[in-house]
Amino acid sequence: MNELRWHPLLREWVAVAAHRQDRPQMPADWCPFCPGSGRVPDNYDVYLYPNDFAAFRLDNPPFAPATGLFVSTGARGATDVVLYHPNHNLAPSQLSQEHWRKVIDLWTRRTRELASHPDIRYVYVFENTGVAIGVTMPHPHGQIYSFPFVPPLIERELGSASEHFQRHGRCLYCEILQGEIADGRRLVVEDTSFYAFVPFFARWPAEIQICSRRHFGSLAELNQAEASSLAGIIKVVRMKYDNLYGFAMPLMMLVRQSPVKGEHPYFHFHIDFYPIQRSATKLKYLAGVESGAGTFLSDTVAEEKAKELRDTEPR
Ligand SMILES: [Zn+2]
Ligand SMILES: [Zn+2]
């Protein structure tokens, strides 16, 4: 079964993809993402791999936005796997800046392609990394989910940004970035086009946001210099995370860009990192208060985590 069901209490769609349960347990000595597997080209730098067990597919029945009790609709969309590198054992932090640039170019190309599809309203680029996050495949990869609706957290950000602009005539994200720069205690690293900082309002331990200096909304608007700068700062952030405790940090990396339909001048491109390690030995779980009430309990202080990350290689 593959469909979207409306949650009338939370007013959001739930993607039911029951066939995901049938995902095969991979043999320990075989990886479909490795060159030579017969599933990918024998030579590749970066590669877009169709997800065999996708929650959203372009050949699913169309999505209808009408909501109500016991309402379901088609999960038309797309689900891609982005293979970062042919080397099975390379951590994302070990990819060179030049190689990260190739990953970013692939994200951008695929975003453009899907933006032109009439049924796609949001292209969501992200990565889950680490066994603690539930990733069973060590081969370095991320994913792209393309939704026929704007997902609720993006919708919420858009709402906040648009309301802030109406009230103050300024971009919410630009103002947050200026505040972080002026304060300075939570900055982690900066380069020509981007800043990385632990937000004042961080919910995850050592959470980092990468925010562009220039105001723009999506991957498709990155210029050449910005794309290379983004590749560099992603690499530095990833290296810092993996050096923080001396092992690969289990995390989510989330590319936040504006919806691909309509005008969204108040949205500002950023990338969020949610690491789930709250110390070298303890994980952050979303338990009763986070999952049931929607309020995060943060065990760490943004200013302290930012200092630890600044002091971690590469300095
Ligand atoms: Zn592999
Ligand atoms: Zn802005």
Image (cartoon, helix red, strand yellow):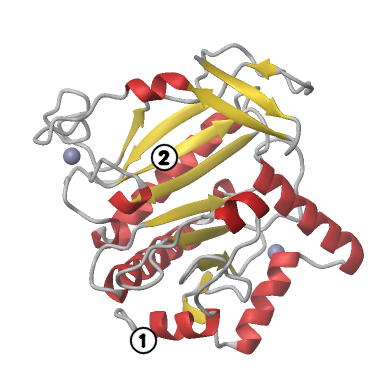
Q: Is residue 297 above or below residue 200?
A: above
Q: Residue furthest left?
A: 29
Residue 199 visible in this rendered orientation of the protein:
yes
Residue placed at 52% from the left, 60% from the top? 272
Q: In the image shown, does 290 or 100 lie closer to the viewer?
A: 290
Q: CA distance from mark 2 to mark 1?
A: 31 Å
* Residue 68, image x, y percentages: 79, 22
> Looking at numbered disc 2 in the image, what kind of residue is underneath it?
Gln
- Number of marks drawn: 2
Disc 2 designates what residue? 143
Q: Which amino acid does the dot numbered 1 rest on?
A: Asp
Residue shown at the point (40%, 83%) measured from the top left: 308
Q: Is residue 186 left or right of residue 5?
A: left
Residue tagged 1: 311
| Residue 53 seen anywhere in this rendered image of the structure | no
List x then y, in percent, for residue 155. 72, 45
Secondary structure beneath label 1: helix
Query: What kind of element bears circle 2?
Result: strand
* Quadrant hosting residue 203: bottom right
Q: Residue at x 23, y 46 (%)?
A: 138
Q: Within 10 Å of the Cα at label 1, are there few (<14), some (14-19), or many (20+) other Cα atoms?
A: few
Q: Is residue 309 left or right of residue 265?
A: left
Q: Earlier in the sequence, mark 2 or mark 1?
A: 2
Note whether ligand 2 is within 8 Å of mark 1.
no
> Quarter of the image containing the C terminus?
bottom left
Quadrant of the displayed image that contains ligand 1 = top left
x then y, percent, for residue 25: 22, 28
